[in-house]
Amino acid sequence: MEFQLETAKIIPKENLGEFLEGLKSFGRLVAPVKKKEKFYFSEIDDVSKVDTDYIRTILPPKKFILEYLRERFEYSPEKMEFLETFKPQSQVVFGLHSCDLHGIAILDAVYLKGENPDPRYLAARKETVLIGISCAPDEDCFCISTGTAFPDGTSWDLFFTDIGDSYFISIGSAKGDEIVHSLEQLFKEISKRDLVLYKKVTAEKKYMFKDGNIPDIERISQVIELEFDSEIWDEEAKRCFSCGTCTNTCPTCFCYTSVDVPSLDGSVVKRVEFITSCQYPYYSLVAGGHWFHENLKERFRNRYYHKYVGYPYQIERFGCVGCGRCQHECPAGIRIVDTLKKLRGAGDEEKSGKATDNIHSA
Amino acid sequence: MKKSLEKLLTISTVHDPFKPQKVRIADIEYLAPDHKRFSFVFVDEELNETWSFKPGQFVMLTVPKAGEIPISICSSPTRKGTVELTVRNVGRKTNVLHQMKCGDVLGLRGPYGNSFPVDLMEGHNVLIIAGGLGMAPLRSLVWYVLDKREKYKKVYLLYGTRNYESVLYKDELGRLKSRNDIKCIYILDKVGTEEDKNWTDREGLITSLIPEVDLDPADTYVAVCGPPVAYKFIGAELIKNGYQESKVFVSLERKMECGVGKCGHCQVGYKFTCVDGPIFPLWDTKNLPKMI
Amino acid sequence: MAKPKIGIMYLTSCSGCQCEILNYESALLKLLDIAEIKYFPIGSSANTLDEELDVLFVEGSVSTELDEKMVKKGREAAKLLVAIGTCASFGGVQANNNDVPVEELLETTYGTIDMPFKITKARPLEEVVKVDYKLSGCPVEGKQFVQASAFLLNGIQPFFPKMAVCYECKLSETECRTLQGLWCLGPITNAGCGAPCTSKGLGCQGCRGDHDDPNYMEMVEVLTERALKDKDLINFMKAFRGNYLKEKLKDAGVEL
């Protein structure tokens, strides 16, 4: 048999249902579905419910890898032996947008890099197949400026790009290849026309964003450090409810609180972890009563600081993938794009024209 | 590019960094009101020999039913056999710990975080500045340095507390004063009772002691631990007296919950106290926002 | 070892919290296995406050002379006293009209001020006795009651960090009611209820009181934008926050 490296295939759209049905043999199927006006990732029984034409879900797909409420251990206070109760489940998450794939890649780095990788995250992640799909941005999307508008190949198995009557399928991993081969009859080889279309639609994406919706994040890490004491933080934070919606809907936020919950009779204790938010005052409260983020402004600023200064230091990339969930869901209507612009000084009168004449000719 | 994912997903996790080991309380010493020192031994005896750490590191201690608390180790790795933790009764978990007795079994994992740069310090003077409960992690350093005394030049210990009652390790520190290989100066904020007078060398703030330390600042490493408010003043006084920012190390307190850089609670600036700290050079505390 | 003794008392209230507890049968049975319920007038016929109780849960606000006597007696008998429900925690709905003299209220309601016992304004427990913990909610959340009991009976202080209702609302993937244009107090209200109202299509009514840092200024602004103004706005916001709302708004610098 001739060995051939395969990187892409074509699937006609009418085969999608059968493909989704076929995915079930690789684990439970998770995909976006519609609930009233909103979308959310859900376990799928009936594949006709899968909605490939969505903008964003309320919660990011991280909830299937890093559950919002989870149990770390169970122990008896008598014996003090810690038993893991988590059993990873094989699953295929279908229909992730590029931003969410990047979000998972960021969580991978947080949880798996370094000296102490988290075995539970690893177990869950190993059992998860990720299949992405191309998308069209709305007014809250800004992945084009965070560099996450396209999957970069580090965190997914298959990626579907809509080229009209078919999907152009990029194969990103051995697992992805295995899936394609197991359902071989649904796929076609790429034609020259398909490739031309693929190149065209991917190139078009960058023109789908409206300039006004794009934040200025050139050198934003440095700008945020320099503007640390700016009154812009006060202005923006004034409207903030500390409700934590921005972080709870964020695909890269990973903070959690761990609490030991004893049973009524005290014979068993569960170590429970729940996703939390740096926007809640208790988050930085230590025993003895000292708050390390002492007020609303500091908590508000902390989110930006961590996303654009902290993550780059910790995992060498921004902690923001431009999915727009935080600004889309914020009950106070605070827009991360606008805050960044204000910090960046865009909109200032000096902005138009060249900042300095002949800056490179001196 | 594709490889990097596979590399991450094929790492093996031989040990679970979240899983505590069983430890038993071997000894409890009352130190001061609401302050006790607990000595722990591992139930798995082999660990008592193999488990090692460096001065300044911390552990996550599981108090049965109550949960995990981050505590600095106050014993020295040069003295194997027990792990000692000094704990103030200040919250819902430490409150339960303070009611526990010798023989009780708890969970312990770690050690975590970086340490005082004991290797860099070799061949130099060491100045140790402790305020209040800050003496706990520094006690580890004091004994480490004293047990490897030949590796270090002059050693100084400055220790300040509010009053005699709140002095930790009274007997031990009292005995240190009679040693000639370490110079100790103790200071109380306010001297009132007879007891106060017997203990202290001086009355006032710990910063007032720094000018009279007769060490060459250029040849001295400084280790500081104390209440958060003290760092600014101690740092400024050290700089004023010629000590170098890069050779001054402070131990910071934050809300560590996981100890391994996953839970986020201990973020300070762009660093995690639990993995990038808890020991930071003074330079960081000046340049990372809201560190001190 | 002797079983811990607990009590459940009620003052001026609708008894809804106690019903919530009685309805939580599976947990109640477990509780009975490990603890002795010494005082629970609504659920038991043998009640005493003459023995020392380990934990006493109290529902309702202190609104009569009798309430005051009972809660003081309960406090003496109990090592730990836990306020359950919004009335016990902040006065509840009945504290809404605390700025109107009691006589006037009686006159309006009963046509007379002549009552068989003395009636006072509705006060939360902590204005009368020392309260160790508060579990707010209308009614108290059964699950939280059981968890609090588990913590307390094991000698651990309960841990319920105060987060906005938005936390649980978003976790249940409910569309934001505020953004939808509804009146919703979720952003300033303490979670722990599981956001049942918002997930059923209502706005949060704020029954659980404030979270750690409620932004009243912005809440008023957001509600005003949704055409809720003046007296209606106050009435909506104070339904469960009682008359204390006015002080809170003043502290937040809200001018109405």
Image (cartoon, coloured by chain):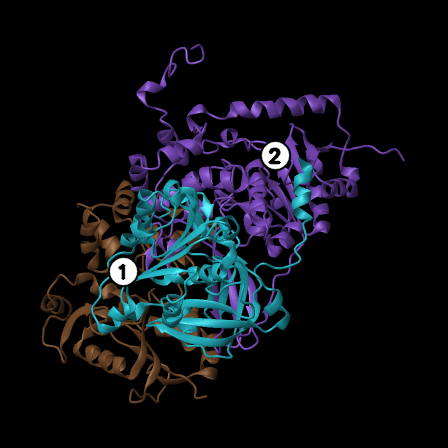
Is residue A143 shown above or below A84? Answer: above
Q: Is residue C248 visible?
A: yes
Callout 2 amino acid: Pro
| Viewer-nearest residue: B188 or A52 | B188
Measured along the vertical axis of the image, is residue A237 above or below residue B104? above
Q: Secondary structure at mark 2?
A: loop
A114 relative position to B37: left or right: right
Q: Residue A285 sits in which quadrant?
A: bottom left
Provide residue A163's location: percent of width, then percent of height. Answer: 65, 27
Identified by mark 1, the residue type is Phe
Who is closer to the viewer here, C235 or A150?
Answer: A150
Chain A colour in the picture? purple
Quadrant placement of the N terminus of chain B: top right
Using the image, determine if residue C62 lies above or below residue A330: below
Q: Which residue is mark 1?
A: C240
* C83 on left or right of B39: left
Q: Give the residue at mark 2.
A: A151
Q: Residues within 10 Å of mark 2 (few under 14, many from 20)?
A: many
Q: Chain of mark 2?
A: A
- Residue B98, position as x, y percentages in the image: 41, 74
Q: Nearer the viewer, residue C184 or C232?
A: C184
Give the chain letter for cyan: B
Name the residue at 14% across, 79% down: C117
Q: Position of residue B23 (x, y in %)?
A: 55, 72
Could you tell me which secondary element the residue under label 1 belongs to? helix
Q: Residue at x 29, y 56 (%)?
A: B206
Subunit bearing disc 1: C
The colour applied to the residues of chain C in this rendering is: brown
